[in-house]
Image: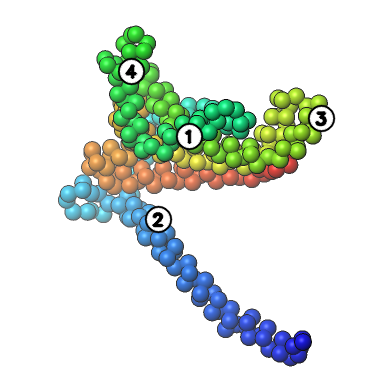
Amino acid sequence: MSRHPLFAQAAHRRFNGPVSRSRQTAVAYGLLAPSLFGVAAFLLLPILVVVWLSLCRWDLLGPIEFVGLDNWHSVLTDGTFGHSLLVTLLFVALVIPVQTALGLAAATLLVRGLPGTVLFRTIYVIPWICAPLAIGVLWHWMLAPTDGAVNALLGQRVEWLTDPSLALPVVAAVSVWTNVGYVALFFMAGLLAIPGDVHNAARVDGATAWQRFRRITLPMLRPTFFFVLVTGVVSAVQTFDTVYALTSGGPQNRTDLAAHRVYAEAFEAAHVGRSAAMSLILFLILVTITVIQHRYFRARVSYDLV
């Protein structure tokens, strides 16, 4: 038995009127309150504290003194932080292409279902889930010049971590080894999401394996490429534990990445204000890079074939 139209209209006004919408809005904000509190307490508030510290002089022990923009002027005119940014740029240029290519190659092999695939999936991910500092200590022992495992296998002494020409490539190689499983994991998800019928149709049309990879696989992996590159660049720029364990920024500051310079400025030189200014500059650089990557991929991320 249907209800009278007047009752239906009254019910509609009751549940969609201004009072009901205000109540729904209040309930929504109430449910979001715990998350909003976490964001404010653990993200926004620390950023505001760092901004405030960048305007002060503090040595971790004495009183805090407001100095305005002196820390910013000191950091921007000091070549030490500029050198760290250049080293970081070179480090990113070494790490990102290699770990992306290796991750894609590993994912391509793992999705074929070859014998031992499950075992290798686990092996690839283990370095990524381990603590970076522990990984750095392990590699520091393996690369030791006198009793290191690598030199023992080579049968000769190589100063992997103290030679200025080898230190940064070695740190980059350790970073790639640590993160390649992470990259392969996401590429595997992207490859498995590609419909098999698309490859079968291309195979029937006579497309070679390289043509299918170039014309089908790569275009449909663009969303995965965007995610992997953004997170990879952010992770590489923020690399600290590996550098701290392997070289501590040496030799001759050849591995003094920006994140390590921020730490050294705060806890070794006791210049917290300069360290805070460096952190904010690094934050602004990462935001700029992320925005540029987003705009670049936004016009290109598509599941259409080319």
Distance (Cα) linking label 1 and label 3:
35 Å
Which numbered disc, 3 or 2, marks the residue that appears first in the sequence?
Answer: 2
Which numbered disc, 1 or 2, marks the residue that appears first in the sequence?
Answer: 2
Does dot 4 land on a helix, a strand or a loop? helix
- Quadrant in which the N terminus is drawn: bottom right
Q: Amino acid at mark 2?
A: Leu
Determine which residue is flagged by label 1.
122
- Quadrant in which the C terminus is drawn: top right
Circle 4 or circle 1, nearest the eye: 1
Residue 97 locus on image (x, y percent): 53, 29
Residue 141 locus on image (x, y percent): 30, 24
* Badge 2 density bin: few <14, some 14–19, many ≥20, Cα 10 Å: few
Distance (Cα) linking label 1 and label 2:
33 Å
**Labelled pair 4, 2 in contact (Cβ < 8 Å):** no
Which numbered disc, 3 or 4, marks the residue that appears first in the sequence?
Answer: 4
Determine which residue is flagged by label 2.
43
Residue at the (44%, 28%) spot, across then down:
177
Determine which residue is flagged by label 3.
204
Residue at the (46%, 40%) spot, across then down:
234
Residue, far front: 115
Q: Front-most of 186 and 93? A: 186
